[in-house]
Image: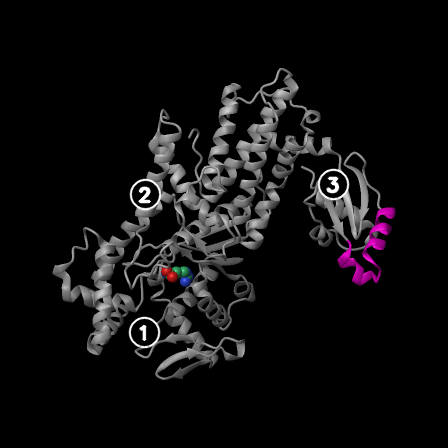
Amino acid sequence: MIDFKQEIANIISKVVSIDANELKGYIETPKDLKNGDYAFPCFRLAKELKKAPPIIAQEIKEKIQFDTNIIEKVEIAGGYINFYIVAEKFTQEVIQELEKEENYGSSNIGNGKCIVIDYSAPNIAKPFHIGHLRSTVIGAALYNIYKYLGYKVIGINHLGDYGTQFGKLIEGYKLWENEYDIEKDPIGELTKIYIRINELCKKDEKVLQSCRDNFKKLEDGDEYCTKLWTRFRELSIKEFQKVYDLLGSKFDYWNGEAFYSDKMQEVIDILEKTGKLISSQGAKIIDLEEQGINTPCIILKTNGSTTYATRDLAAILYRARTYDFDKALYVTSYEQVLHFKQVFEVAKLLGLDEKYTKGLEHISFGMVLLPTGKMSTREGNVVKLEDLLQESIARAREIIEQKNPSLENKEEISKKVGIGAIIFNDLANSRVKDEIFEWDKILNFQGETGPYIQYTYVRTQSVLEKAGITEEIINLENVNPKVLQDEYSQDILKLLYNFKEILEQVTEKNEPSILARYLIDVAKAFSAFYNENKIMVEELEIRDSRLFLTHAVGKVLKIGANLLGIQMPDKM
Ligand code: ARG
């Protein structure tokens, strides 16, 4: 498919002696079609050339030469040069590309570069909360999209399966083993133990000390402590798996924090050698004042225990060596901004090639606020995520039951819709924004939601079905670009043309919401097209062309939704 932006950049490059790739980055897509299909702003050149933008625009326009089969006309508007693509040529290009069928929008731009994505990472013996859900969903979407663009992607679930809280849990379990049935409701019961032991620790310094000792024992491989820890871990993962099954989540590795228990000494040794690991009130820390970070990074606590940060440092070392990553992304809420700032700074002391330390990136996201406010483990007012997902499925089912009582496979469809709604909601807004979780908004079939995208997809499929077209048999022989020149068809074609670029933007900004918003735009464009253009008309050329467009919309919606981790129902 012709890359029109590239084409224009090449044309301009010839007359301004600036690299075409740089120029390509300047080119905009005007909101208003009156201003052409592409616009080149001359403002940035103005400084360099010491001339007013409209004058530069005029000069460039006079000098450039272009193929009139591709570019219809070029006009000046203020400091912009507007390019109008020959509509039929454009239409034909997009149609041809869409006809190629396989993996529309995929590319090899990633060129096998390795991206490590660290996401989900719930904590053993604690509820899988809604923040972990967001991490799981954002991480999975990034995973899929990078992969689709030819990157080698490694997904890691860096489970919180280590740390002082296990010292507390072990102590609590020792004290009250008989009062709790951790087989029946592992996380619920372990949470109760955790809350209770925390209370006791506040009152009794001696208990707190035993907890700390337990963790030290665990680190030293004590048999009893290790046995309990293993059991807590296994039971918890079994619980988490229920959520992952509902979401369809998969990971390449489940190397949690404990995986690094024997890999931290090396980190400590390296840091020791740099002379930067200093003692402070009995702990070993790296001061980061000079780097503009006021809180030092604690590597060893007063009692010699390692920290969350020490384990992340060991993980960086391990991942650099094992995967030779080009980028390592960490998907967590913005509450951990300081943590990652510290860790990424200290990582520079590990003697790794700059390639690795430069590739570290914290992909932070906002909080999910339930109407009742933020949720926390220690107070215990937590919504169980599995319940939340099940509730979404049940609510989706109710709506479907009302709208389409005779539908078959209601169960499966409700699941796709209920889960899809939650996933989409997590991805729909730019990730740094806090999000308020409201059922009516999330499940609104007419709103900017997952169900709306699914609903639009289903509509495309039912149009095709009525016309006797299935995914396998698309015998549309009479497609003609000439009859797709109306504004509604063109709107759709423009969007479909942009799909590849949208996916690239997602990876540039690590922002899946760009794809989510795009799918809404495609769905809206299809609704407008569908309302304005009758599809099943007598004229075969028009009918086939419109059916083709319908098919293409369905295809892109499905590919896009799947990349976000959302399944498409065939009916709903
Ligand atoms: N378990 C952590 C939490 O729940 C998230 C871990 C993120 N990954 C990492 N490498 N630190 O907050």
Secondary structure of residue under mark 3: helix
Q: Tell me the kind of residue under disc 3.
A: Lys
Q: Is residue 222 visible?
A: no
Can you say which quadrant of the picture contains the N terminus?
Answer: top right
Dot placed on the residue nearer the N-terminal end, 2 or 3: 3
Q: Amino acid at mark 1?
A: Ser
Query: What's under tag 2, amino acid-wise?
Result: Gln
Q: Is residue 403 above or below residue 40?
A: above
> Quarter for ligand 1?
bottom left
Left or right: 15 in relation to 425 = right
Q: Is residue 513 left or right of residue 193?
A: right
Q: Residue 563 at what x, y percent from top left?
A: 49, 42
**Residue for badge 1:** 305
Q: Is residue 193 visible?
A: yes
Query: In the rendered structure, which segment of residues is drawn in magenta?
Result: 42-63
Residue at label 3? 34
- Judged by depth in the image, the label closer to the viewer, 2 or 3, is 3
Residue 308 included in the magenta stretch of the image:
no
Question: Which numbered disc flags the more N-terminal residue, 1 or 2?
Answer: 1
Query: Which is in the foreground here, disc 3 or disc 1?
Result: 3
